[in-house]
Amino acid sequence: MSILINNNTRLLVQGITGRDGSFHTRQMLDYGTNVVAGVTPGKGGMEVEGVPVFNSLSEAVKKTEANTSVIFVPARFSSSAIYEAADAGIKLIVCISEGLPTIELVKITAYLKNKDCRLVGPNSPGLVSAGESKVGILPGHIFKKGKVGVISRSGTLTYEIVDHITRVGLGQSTCIGIGGDPIIGTKFIDCLELFADDKDTEAVVLVGEIGGRDEQDTAEYVKKYFKKPVFGFIVGKTAPPEKRMGHAGAVISGTSGTAAEKIKVFKECGIKVGDTPAEVAQLVKEML
Amino acid sequence: MSILINNNTRLLVQGITGRDGSFHTRQMLDYGTNVVAGVTPGKGGMEVEGVPVFNSLSEAVKKTEANTSVIFVPARFSSSAIYEAADAGIKLIVCISEGLPTIELVKITAYLKNKDCRLVGPNSPGLVSAGESKVGILPGHIFKKGKVGVISRSGTLTYEIVDHITRVGLGQSTCIGIGGDPIIGTKFIDCLELFADDKDTEAVVLVGEIGGRDEQDTAEYVKKYFKKPVFGFIVGKTAPPEKRMGHAGAVISGTSGTAAEKIKVFKECGIKVGDTPAEVAQLVKEML
Amino acid sequence: MKVHEYQAKEIFKKYGIPTPKEKMCRNIDEVVIAASKEIGIPCVIKAQVMVGGRGKAGGIKVAKNEKEVKDYAEKILGMEIKGIPVKKVLVSEAISIVSEAYLGIINDRTTKKTVMMACKEGGVEIEVIAKQKPEAIYKVYADPLVGFMPHKSREIGLFLYNEPKRAFECASITEKLYNLFIELDSSLAEINPLVVDKSGKLIALDAKINFDDNGLYRHPDIESMRDRESEDENELLAREQNLSYVKLSGNIGCVVNGAGLAMATMDLVKHFGGEPANFLDIGGSSSPGKVKNALEILLKDKNVKVIFFNIFGGITRCDDVANGILEAKKCLNIKQPIVARLTGTNEDKAMEILKEAGLIFTQTMDQGAKKAIELLN
Amino acid sequence: MKVHEYQAKEIFKKYGIPTPKEKMCRNIDEVVIAASKEIGIPCVIKAQVMVGGRGKAGGIKVAKNEKEVKDYAEKILGMEIKGIPVKKVLVSEAISIVSEAYLGIINDRTTKKTVMMACKEGGVEIEVIAKQKPEAIYKVYADPLVGFMPHKSREIGLFLYNEPKRAFECASITEKLYNLFIELDSSLAEINPLVVDKSGKLIALDAKINFDDNGLYRHPDIESMRDRESEDENELLAREQNLSYVKLSGNIGCVVNGAGLAMATMDLVKHFGGEPANFLDIGGSSSPGKVKNALEILLKDKNVKVIFFNIFGGITRCDDVANGILEAKKCLNIKQPIVARLTGTNEDKAMEILKEAGLIFTQTMDQGAKKAIELLN
């Protein structure tokens, strides 16, 4: 089993004709993802990597029964791409694009509140249910089917962690890059709720970073409600305050949102924290 | 029994210190309505007709457990008054004010959609559950407790109809002025749904007018679902097309929304239509 | 509130919606100069009146040479359409039309949402199509939180046109039409027809914008576009005094509080064989002054032979109205008989006032209407 | 993006939020003229630097006479606050403060809503209060459909002030602050303190506005307020090339793809006893040119003794990076040793390229970090 995506995922690629869109369509197809449609307004009728392209989501969904979409369009068109997907009845929208103004996410959150539709991202590398489906840009070859769930605010760091988990001989159930922006559609806790019910997930690794208090809230949640073992890794220990470290969400405000604070709360709530990616994988291996 | 308001109604008057607000507070108190609070920002601490005035709805609701509000503030502050009432947890908002731009109602509709809150109006004369509670500006003395429900798009015409019903020896369960604007919170059908479940209502009188197709839709609904006898009266038979007859909603567009069309559909759907207010009351009397 | 086609097109231009080269003219000389110097011949001369069916009435003509320009200008500027004299014409570039479509937006009463409507048949009245083949109208609803989103505009474009390029050109027009509609508190904004010309370009050949009267207070610039000449003087006057008046063709003047009751009063007069002279709603909380103003407007209609007051007092206090009648009778020197039916708040006081002044009053509106008709003879 | 207090106050003024009489000055002469001619003495001289704690650092002084004006101007314009030289001061009207409050607005990460925060204690850092007594902060959330409604603004006003008049004055400021926040894609807009002066008037004594970098593309006017002098030149240069760079104090230059991995790399260098020289994220889909640009920026920091590439290729193709390194090595004449750890998409090709060029590469980031530290000696 797995969460969010699996063999029943019928993926639609928004912005399929762009450089990234077409490249990753190929990569996802190679991984075995069922990519059923692409959309680029004005390019309807084309094919990209054998996938039919439509002018609109509503047409594409009607004709292909796509249930999940991944967004590769430039930031300034991304909010509108999210609304289009939600309106077309897509159940899971994965927004890879980064650079959306935060206020757009406030609006999107309000808009999606009453729709049966989940957003992952923006600024997410996507997600992988090992051996079943890959949506986004994570490199498929580092995954191995297994029992560790991974939730991460970052992209390449996730690959690093996943790679270590695989190298120590374990595998992943589902790995989700929730995105590095201050406001994101799906947060750590949302994923944990799903992992709680997933029989194949026996442990979860949380990859957090400086900024905000999502990790702290998550730790409290883990302590109170989550029964499976949880491991943590927090980056930005050497980051100076008030500086945005790449991700829009990775800023220490005054003295709050530091790595030290997050690591402290993790530990207090029973989450085992590794000092390096390699160490995290080791900790998981020792437990399972 | 009755619908929407009754002995448990705890009324709050928005704009209580104004000319109309204070006058009708007196009138409502005299009718026996339980007016528990008034709000006029900046006038908190005052009393009007013995009713305590607060600066904000949230404070007033907290202190008085008001569950219904009636709005007497000028049009340009009315949308904001509606939002404030909804945010404060008011369950029934009756907007007497007229002159709200239609686009505001589009927004208000979207805002209230996910709240447990009903709006009657705007541009409504209010409602009366005979012998129990009166909210709004309808003159109380014309009502008599009885078994006829009245739903009307207009104000004084409603009094006229009610007066006739009373004079033929019948009485009213609840009378609702739904308002004369193109977009209103509660429509004919919404009221019929409530009357259907009200044991004390044995017949319903619909008072409609030119403009829109709410009467036509209602007639179809009555034919399909509504089991109690329904009577109708439509005004504007002599109104010229394309002219707004006072009410923002009373305009015949091209050839649609005419009184003739509405009367025709009423009759086709089994609604007995009177030619004059007196005749409507006679028709009801003959049936009951 | 309505505006002329040429005014709607000015707004279109401001919002970037493509329109033909055009010039509004008030007399024949202006038309001849505009046609020969600015617009070019052939050109189209279009009567500027705010009623439908201009074309059928002969108010739109294509002039192929200078003589025709002059002839048509003269003819159209001299005509009346549905009783309204044509005082302005629009001289418009002649467009070779490849296809016509309809694009319009309203706030829909039933769904309580803003809805954009598109139809592949242009130039036809949308209400007619709505009745005859509603399935030909493609509707897309806006969400007030996010407006009319790009994909919805594209949906409209792709419904009307097969070529993506044209569809997206249309989407851009759709978006502008939505913005205009919302920002200006419009109640109808319509491009009918939206045409494709020979070069493949989309152009709004005609334009119609109505405004929500309730929203005008926040748009003084729109209010200032009001063509007072083309509106009934008395209706304007009434509005300025917060009264609502519409002239009809009968001879029984009606003064009523409340729009519904005012319509019911008109209908009742007709029902008993009379002819109402007007719709007149004096509204709530009437003061004696307001009643006087109402009568002043009413009496500008020389057809009025009898005046029928029908008041059911809720907010309105009957004694205020009675006092207003007396005052007006004095100041305005009213010769016509007045029948008063005042009931509701303070009706007893009112009755006394009327009785003292020797005025006719009745208990019910049926009696009042009948009495008024009786007094005609 | 941050702006100075004087810039934030200009924006406040545009939105009608009351501020003291003030003038920004760049040198002592300007200060003396401003104080004596425009603002009046006593006045307040405030260092314009974009860091907190100006007051404690001596960057804010009340000058009671002309001599003090000159003395303080000289002193403040010569000082550094947290390493940042003061190049501008604000000469501000001296206000007699009756009470101080806090008013601020952000997009809250937890609730995903825009939230207005008010606190009866002004002049204190809100993060400090949030930690020590969160109950002292009154929060009101906006709804994106309808904005910050008047009753919510009044709620804030009534929380801060007992007198309705003052409360509604505050409500009006609150509304303006919200509009500014939304319209300008702000990430923080703060009045701290909001003061009541002797005459009972509310005044924004200090102003702070941060902008959402992701929203700047739609606000060229805000972008043009950027004080390039007060930002790190290399960070600016990096941003212009779509790179993300932050200078640190160490000597191991890090070039990484992805912000999370870049932070992890810094932390790892530190973990193994080294000192990272920087944060540098070259982002996804890197071309060889981008790698070259990154190195160019990195090498402007003369502390850098070793360069550590840590790339995990997803979108980024490792061969692109390898080619970029070779190209840069040639063009920029790089003397420092380079340790490359490239894994993921096209890692085999990358390995070959590096091998051919004789560069040091490692399998894991642990090895890479250790190797880089080793090469320091």
Image: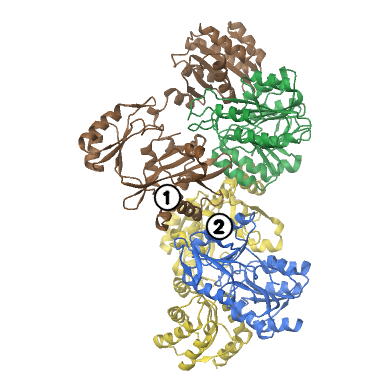
Chain colours: A blue, B green, C brown, D yellow
Q: Position of residue B149 (x, y in %)?
A: 71, 29
The lab-note entry on whether marks 1 and 2 share a chain reads no
In this rendering, is residue C126 above or below D348?
A: above
Does residue D168 appear in the picture of this structure? no
In this rendering, is residue D41 above or below A266?
A: above
Nearest the viewer among A118 and C345 is: A118
Tag of residue D248: none
The type of residue carrying mark 1 is Ile
Tag of residue C173: 1
Rendered image quadrant of residue A260: bottom right
Rendered image quadrant of residue C269: top right
Q: Is residue D220 left or right of residue B16?
A: left
Q: Position of residue D19 (x, y in %)?
A: 52, 52
Q: Is residue D71 left or right of residue C37?
A: right
Nearest the viewer among B138 and D347 is: D347
The type of residue carrying mark 2 is Tyr
Q: Is residue A197 left or right of residue D258?
A: right
Q: Which secondary structure, mark 2?
A: helix
Q: Position of residue A42 (x, y in %)?
A: 44, 61
Circle 2 residues within 10 Å: few <14, some 14–19, many ≥20: some
Q: Position of residue C44 (x, y in %)?
A: 29, 39
Residue at mark 1 to residue at mark 2: CA–CA distance: 20 Å
Tag of residue A83: 2
